[in-house]
Amino acid sequence: MFEFGDRVQLSDAKGNKHTIVLVPDKEFHTHRGALLHNDIVGLPEGSMVTSTNGTTYMVLKPLLLDHILAMPRGAAVIYPRDSAQIVVEADIFPGATVVEAGVGSGGLSSYLLRAIGPQGTLVSFERREDFALTAKKNVEAFVGEAPTNWEVVVGDLQEVAPTRSDLVGKVDRLILDMLAPWECVETAKTLLKPGGVLCIYVATTTQLSRVAETLRIHQSWTESRAWEMLVRGWHLEGLSVRPEHRMVGHTGFLLTTRRLADGVTPLTKRSKPAPGAYGPDWTAPDTSALAPNPSIAEQTEGQ
Ligand SMILES: C[S@@+](CC[C@H](N)C(=O)[O-])C[C@H]1O[C@@H](n2cnc3c(N)ncnc32)[C@H](O)[C@@H]1O
């Protein structure tokens, strides 16, 4: 039954949705008339209520995906369909210690918090203070309070996280959603436990290629796996059962890899890349900034 303080989603017959928080004696107004919040209190979810001009609304508590698609955004959010992939493919488990950067609008954070449960810990790094604040407000608006197992740190992941002794070598899963994730590869190694999963979300193929090659040169990771999610909705009406005419054609690419133990190098593929796979003008990259271990630089020079 609905109570004062609940978040409630009102949907009309056309599918228009409004989310309100129930407050004693308050009214919800649109050009379709007014609804008294008191009239919703005590009803079970899935009830119908009618406004003063006769418009009927269905009342439900919003799902987390409704909240994420409607919440205020400082930066682009990870869509729920990609968050679902991250939870499964990055193997986010109850009790895990998870780090994410950047937190943006907090779109992914809510799903990570659900997946780790109350025994887990989520530390989210965000370089922009205003975005960090938006993310906190968005997560708290849905949960109803600030989760005690969630810390939002303002600062660049690669500068702040390595100074945190509670995180160095203790992180199970690390998620990067930022413009230049290749800048955080060394930090990812510093934070993750051996076997820990690094999951990277990027919007473009050029970012995907650059981060994949950086990981390869870094020599501390299993072979990367990359994919994207295409979701096509279906129209369901009588005999007209067909794909929707419109779809979101692109959100981003996901890449996962796992941290190797210290002192080992990755397994090499038996088949060599095709001649020209790296382009005719390709030269061995300068690995000195990435690889403090000189043996790694020696290995790549010969390629
Ligand atoms: C696309 S948004 C993240 C969206 C977020 N995952 C969500 O679902 O709402 C990217 C964010 O990364 C932040 N950022 C970029 N580089 C960063 C870094 N090195 N450390 C911390 N935050 C960073 C940006 O300020 C921006 O807010």
Image: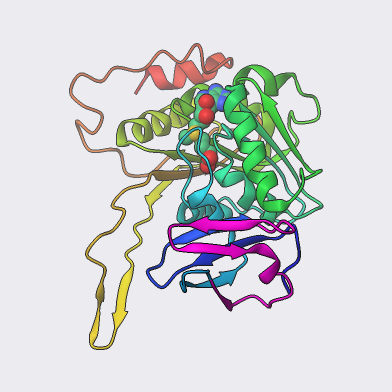
Residue 291 horizontal/vertical position (percent): 54, 18
Percent across and percent down for residue 60 are 59, 69
| Residue 162 picture quarter | top right
Residue projecting furthest to the front:
52
Residue at 77% of width from left, 49% of height from top?
A: 120
Q: Is residue 51 above or below residue 133?
A: below
Q: Nearer the viewer, residue 289 or 16?
A: 16
Q: Is residue 212 visible?
A: yes
Picture residue at 39% right of the left edge, 30% below the top: 213
Residue occupying the point 75% across, 36% down: 170
Q: Position of residue 132 (x, y in %)?
A: 62, 30
- In magenta, the rendered stretch is 21-50
Residue 73 part of the magenta-drawn span: no
- Looking at the rendered image, the quarter that the C terminus falls into is top left
Q: Nearer the viewer, residue 298 or 96?
A: 96
Q: Is residue 88 visible?
A: no
